[in-house]
Image (cartoon, rainbow, N blue to C red):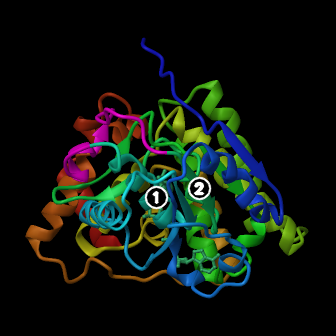
Amino acid sequence: MKYKNFPMVPRVIFGRGSFNQMNEIIAPKRLLNQAPFIFIIDDFFIGSQKIISNINLYGSDEIIYVSAQEEPKTTQIDELVKYIKTSVSEQPAGIIGIGGGTVIDISKAVAIMLTNNGKTCDYQGWDLVNNPAIYHVGIPTISGTGAEVSRTTVLTGPERKLGINSDFTPFDQVILDPELTSSVPKNQWFFTGMDCFIHSIESLNGTYLNAFSQSYGEKALDLCKQVFNEDYLTEQESQDKLMMASWHGGMSIAYSQVGIAHALSYGLSYVLGTKHGIGNCIVFDHLEDYYPEGVTLFKEMKEKHGIILPKGVCSSLKDVEFDTMIRVAMSLEPLWENAIGKQWKSLITPQLLRGLYEKM
Ligand code: NAD
Ligand code: ZN
């Protein structure tokens, strides 16, 4: 047995309003290096008082707004890196990513690709990155993905949706300010929050489970239950707790793995462009045979919050599209092995997955 020796985010600040300390947190990095900071920000925040007005720009610092309407693509990272290299004369002092999982992942990938040659898609996989990324800071504005703490950045490439999993991917600094999540619309709050719930269920019910993952997974699950299935929290407490649930969920899967909902959701996303949070929910709703207690609880929470999931999302797919979806899902071998065990290939067949996708 070879145990993983994985890196964690070395510095984190937590608290309502802690975003206001960002300028002072990054200042020392600026003093060592006169190069600019590049702020990659979700375009939802264009003109935001809370965020944009609180960023002190110096010299050739630049804000790049990106849309989170679609999930990040490897070609998008290539273009951003090319743009930064041509618009800034020297290597930036750092990348500051402000947004949901989409922008967080884009920021990590850009920080890596500024110091590694070639195309972003060459690094999709496990431990393919050669050089350390530049200093990168993550500031999540929506809670659930755990991307702020994870060792991966999930990207859709020409062949597959797969992360850049590496020791250089995690942020050097994370700022957890739950106040930044106060503007998240209800449906999005539920979908992204359920990503965390599903991380905890898949981790806790996987064959890779160990005491490390379990301790974080149980805490994430407990916090999700408080936030989504109880009524006693104030709005602020709920925001605070969901931000910490996301962190714990991410820590839990860091030392185990996700499972069936994620494998199938990656297939949906690759063929239909379905976003991660809602895709996980669409899939998880049909996984009662695999995660009976989790799915029962999920249905209760869905009902409680009046969430209506789309139906028949695969109804007009052609055979070739189903085949691609199934290929992408089945290629995520560690996820299936975690969910089912080493013998998963004898139990999980393309026909079985086709049946599941047809139900969605
Ligand atoms: P997102 O970043 O896709 O954003 C969803 C929507 O919410 C967007 O419209 C965005 O503009 C909006 N939004 C974000 N913050 C807001 C705020 N404070 N107020 C109002 N609107 C706001 O959402 P997400 O679910 O956090 O991220 C999904 C992405 O995360 C996917 O690309 C997925 O692959 C990735 N992901 C990564 C990891 C990882 O470990 N790296 C893990 C899970 C998911
Ligand atoms: Zn997820």
Labelled disc at residue 107: 1
For the point 73% across and 78% down, which residue is it?
50
Q: How many marks?
A: 2
Furthest residue to the left? 320
- Residue 238, by quadrant, is bottom right
- Residue 346, by quadrant, is top left
- Of 97 and 285, nearer the camera is 97
In the displayed structure, 21 sits above or below 218; it is: below
Q: Is 102 covered by the magenta stretch?
A: no
Residue 197 horizontal/vertical position (percent): 61, 56
Report the Cα–Cα distance between label 1 and label 2: 8 Å
Identify the amino acid type marked 2: Gly
Answer whether residue 70 is visible to the viewer in this image. Answer: yes
Residue 169 horizontal/vertical position (percent): 45, 42
- Of 63 and 201, nearer the camera is 63
| SS at mark 2 in the image | strand
Task: Report whether the residue tagged 2 is closer than 8 Å to ligand 1.
Answer: no
Which quarter of the figure is the C terminus placed in?
Answer: bottom left
In the displayed structure, 197 sits above or below 208; it is: below
The residue that label 2 is drawn on is 138
Labelled disc at residue 191: none
Residue segment shown in magenta? 117-134
How packed mark 1 is, by other alpha carbons closer than 10 Å (few <14, some 14-19, many 20 or more), is many
Marks 2 and 1: in contact by CB < 8 Å?
A: yes
Residue 206 horizontal/vertical position (percent): 49, 37
Q: Is residue 174 left or right of residue 77?
A: right
- Of 314 and 236, nearer the camera is 236
